[in-house]
Amino acid sequence: MPRQEPWLRSMVDFYATMMRTQLLMQFQYRAATYMYTLGMVAEPTIYLVVWSSIARSHGGTVNGLTPQAFAAYYIVWTLVRTMNIVFTPYGWEERIREGQLSAGLLRPLHPIHFDLAMFAGQKLVWILMYLPIAVGLSLVFHPALHPGTVQILVFLVAIWGAYLIRSMNLWILGMVSIWTTRASAIFQTYVLTELLLSGRLVPLTLMPHWAQTLAAWLPFKWTFYFPIEVLVGHMSNLSLVGGLGMQLLWTAIGASVVAGAWRLSVRHYSAVGN
Amino acid sequence: MLRRVPGVVHVSELTKIFRVPEREGGMNAALRSLVKRQWRDVHAVERISFDIDAGEVVGFLGPNGAGKTTTLKMLSGLLYPTSGEGTVLGHVPSKRERDYLRRMTLVMGNRNQLQWDLPALDSFELNRAIYRLPREDFRKTRDELIGLLDVGDLVRKPVRQLSLGERMKVEIVGSLLHLPQVLFLDEPTIGLDVTMQRRLRVFIAEYNQRYGATVLLTSHYMADVEALCKRVIVIHHGQILFDGQLDALADRFTTTKTIKAVLADGEQVTLTVPRAETSKTTAQLLAEHEVHDLTVEDPPIEDVIEQVFAS
C-alpha cells in the first residue's frame, strides 16, 4: 500500500491545492468572472438607490440611517454576499444527474471539503475583482465607513464565519436532492426567509421588532447582518466577540446536522445512471 | 467442513432492490398518482455470490440492465446493498472507510472526474492531495503511468480540448495515481476506436502484471474480455448464469462447433455441426476428401454470449 502523508498536513495541502486550481480557472476566464462580479453589484445598487431616495424624502434619514449609512451598508453587503455564494440545491440536482456526486463519493475525503475549498478559491478572485468596483461605488455614493483595526480584523474572520454557516445550511438543503428531485422548491422558501431575516433585503434595524427578535434565534442574521454591522456599525468589543461566538455555534450546529444527514443520505443514494 | 478463505473480492447472496415510482401515461394517471402513488420493486441484483482472488482479471458480462454496474457500485461503496454480504480487501464497501477508498478505484467509461478547463496535470495534483500521496511517490507513479499510456503531451492540454479516447486515457492515469489494488472498470473502452481500445487493453494487462492488481471488468466488446480475462462471470436479470473459465463458456452454452477445411482443389468448406458429432464429422471429412488444412472452432464469443442471454 502506498505511503501517505499525515492527516493535518494533507488537509492543508488539499485546501491549498484546490484553491490554487480554482484560482487558475477563474483567471483563465477572467472576462466572464468580471462580468459575473459586475452582475453581483446590481442587486445592492438597486436597494441602495431606493433606500437613499426614501431617506432623502423623509428629511435625510430612515430610522436614523442616512444615505451615506445605506451606502456603507450596501457596499459592504456586496462583499459579504460574494463570500456567501455557495453550492445551491440547483447545483446539487445537476451534480447528482451528471454523476459528479458519485465521483465525489469514491474519494477518501468528505465531499463538503471540495465545496468549501472550491468556493474559497473562487472568492479570492471575486473579491479582488470587486475591490475596484467598491472604490467606484464609494466615489459615487460617499459611504459613512470608518472602521477601526479591531473591526477590520473581526470582519475578516466574520465573513469566513458567514461563509461556513451558509455552506452548512445549503448543504443540508442540497442533501434533500438525494431524497427528492425537487429540492429547489425548498430552496426558494429558504431564500425568501433569508431575504427577510438576514439583513439581505434591508438592514435588520428597519424590520419590525418581532422580526428582529425572531432573527436573533435563527442563523440567517449571522451570515449577512452581523458581518456587515461589524464594519459599518458601532459594535462594542463584547458584541463583536459575542457575534463571532454565535457564528461558531451556528457553524457547529450546521456541521453536526450535515454529518448526521449525510450518513442517512448516502445510505439512501441510488446512483442511478452515472 | 473446510471454510473457504475469502478472496480479495468476496460476494455472498448480494442483492439490490430499487423501489421506483411508476404510473401510466396521461392526465388521469397523473391525477391518480397525486392521491395514490404506485411503486414497483426492481430487482437489479439478486442473491449473487462469487469470489475473486488477488491478481485475477475477471470479465463481468451481461446485456444492458443485467445488474453489472449496480454490482460494481455496491462493491465500490456507492450503493448500499438491500441484503447479502460483500467485502473487498477485507472492507465492507458500504461503510466507505477511507482506507478502503484509497485502495480501490472505479473507472466508468462515461464519467469525467478531471477539471474540464485545466490541463490534467492540475487535476492529478489535486488527486495527490486527496489521496495523501507523498510528492516524490506521486511524481514517480504519475510519470510511470504517463509513460505507459504515452500521454505526455495530452496531460498538458486543457481536458476539454482532448478527444474522447485521449480523455479516457488521462482519466485512467488520474484514477490510478494512488496505485489501487482493486480496479472496477465499467466499460472503459466504450466509444473508443479500435487502436485506442487495444492500447487500453495492453495498459490494463500491464498494470495488472506490474502491481498485482485485481480487476473486475465489464465490457460489451468481447475483444476486451478475450484479451484480458481468463475467467468470466455472466449476469442476466440480476442473477449469475455462469462463473468460470472463458473457454468453458462455449462448452456449456453452445451446441455446435465450426469445422473449416481447405480441400486439395482449393475449395474452402465450413460446416456447423452438433458438438457431439464433431469427431465423427471430422473423421468422415478426412476419409472422403483430400484435405490440406482443417480447423475445429467454437463459435465466436459474441455468438456464445448471445446464446447465453437467450437461454
Image (cartoon, coloured by chain):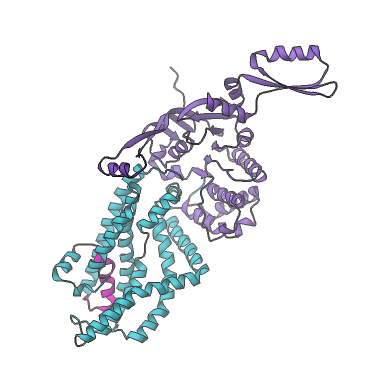
Chain colours: A cyan, B purple
Quadrant position of residue B83? top left
For the point 59% across and 45% down, the residue is: B191
Task: Tell me what residue is drawn at x 40 percent, y 72 percent.
Answer: A39
Residue at image coords 24%, 69%:
A241
Q: Main secondary structure of the magenta part?
A: helix
Q: Is residue B27 above or below residue B237?
A: below
Where residue B32 sits: x, y (%)?
28, 41
What residue occupies the far left of the structure in this picture?
A: A210
Q: Which residues are magenta?
A: A217-236
- Residue B97 visible at all: yes
Number of callouts:
0
Visible in this render: residue A147? no
Q: Is residue A234 magenta?
A: yes
Say whether residue A74 is left or right of residue B266: left
Relative to B51, A260 lies left or right: left
**Magenta stretch: includes residue B90:** no
